[in-house]
Image (cartoon, rainbow, N blue to C red):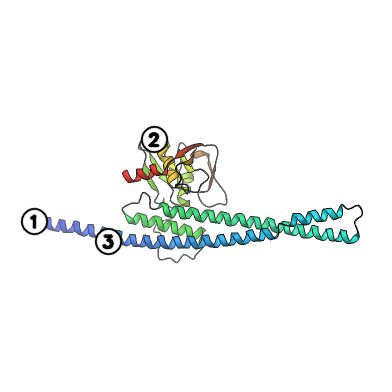
Amino acid sequence: MWGQKKSKTKNSKIGISLSIYYSNKIAERKINSLREKLTQDLRNSKDLEIRKLEEQKLLIQNISEYITMQNKANNLLTLPSPTKKQIIESQKLFKEAKRKKRSRESILNRINFHKKKISEIENYELFLDSLMHGKNEDNTNNLESIIELKEEIEAYICIKQNKSKFKSNRIKEQPSNIKEIQSPSGLKIQIGGNNRQNELISLRKGKKGDLWFHAQESPGSHVVLKSSNGLVDEKDIQLAADLASLFSRAKANKQVAVVMVPIENLQRISGALPGTVSHRGGKVLWGKADRAEKYFHHK
């Protein structure tokens, strides 16, 4: 009887292990499928915005002569004795120059809009690429993270009806699956995996005393060192700066300028995407992406 119980326990453990293995494999296939689709969707959206931007740049070239028209009209009116015909011609030139100037301002606004959209798309491409770092062996969490990113992309970039077979099981009010690691001193370091997570860790859950890190003048993830929970060490700060450089578009650089700001000095920019902030003051540090990479390989 004892031997039979031992055998049943062993078989049960094998069954659980197999179940976990196959569940992870199924989740891995879904992750790869979503990654490929999101990569293509982002590429298509980026190509479309680039085409629209180039169209607007061509338009701006065609109407840039409004200054020449204004000068020509001024020259006519400053003649010693302009004729009636010259006065009428100058009025027409002024009117046309004014129309072109208004058009130019409108086109410049559209150019800035398309540039902003391209920057946002590149930021999502970065988030998608960053999902590979610190990958959890449990693909269920990885799948939830990529589905959450997909829903955000569909909401802000590739506007679609929400009919996907892949939907997040997470209740929107609940915390996201934030990437968290432990600093050398044992403090928590949080890394945003999408814009909503950036907003969550920096603005909604950040506490006075926490430190915020971000690659300077480069799209990337928000990194928050939870220094409100204990004494911070220079090694903690350096690791946070290295992580901010790794999870940024500038990660290929040998060194990345990273700004460190007390979290209470952050302010959300109204009307922008979630997680878009401005800050007062701050200190510039140098982060190295390769050091952060080594940390993930050796932790």
Secondary structure under the numbered disc 2 in the rendered image: helix
Q: Residues within 10 Å of mark 1 (few under 14, many from 20)?
A: few
Residue 255 in the image: x percent, y percent?
45, 41
Q: CA distance from mark 2 to mark 1?
A: 54 Å
Q: Nearer the viewer, residue 68 or 228?
A: 68
Residue marked by disc 1:
3
Q: Earlier in the sequence, mark 3 or mark 2?
A: 3
Decide which of tag 2 and tag 1 comes sooner along the chain.
Answer: 1
Give how far across and how far down residue 32 sits, in percent: 37, 61
Query: Which secondary structure lies at badge 1?
Result: helix
Front position among marks 1 and 3? 3
Mark number for residue 97?
none
Q: Which mark is residue 235?
A: 2
Q: Earlier in the sequence, mark 1 or mark 3?
A: 1
Does 2 sit left or right of 202 as displayed?
left
At 8% across and 56% down in the image, what residue appears? Answer: 3
What residue does disc 3 label?
A: 22
Image location of residue 235, percent across then percent down = 39, 35
Q: Name the residue at 49% across, 53% down.
A: 123
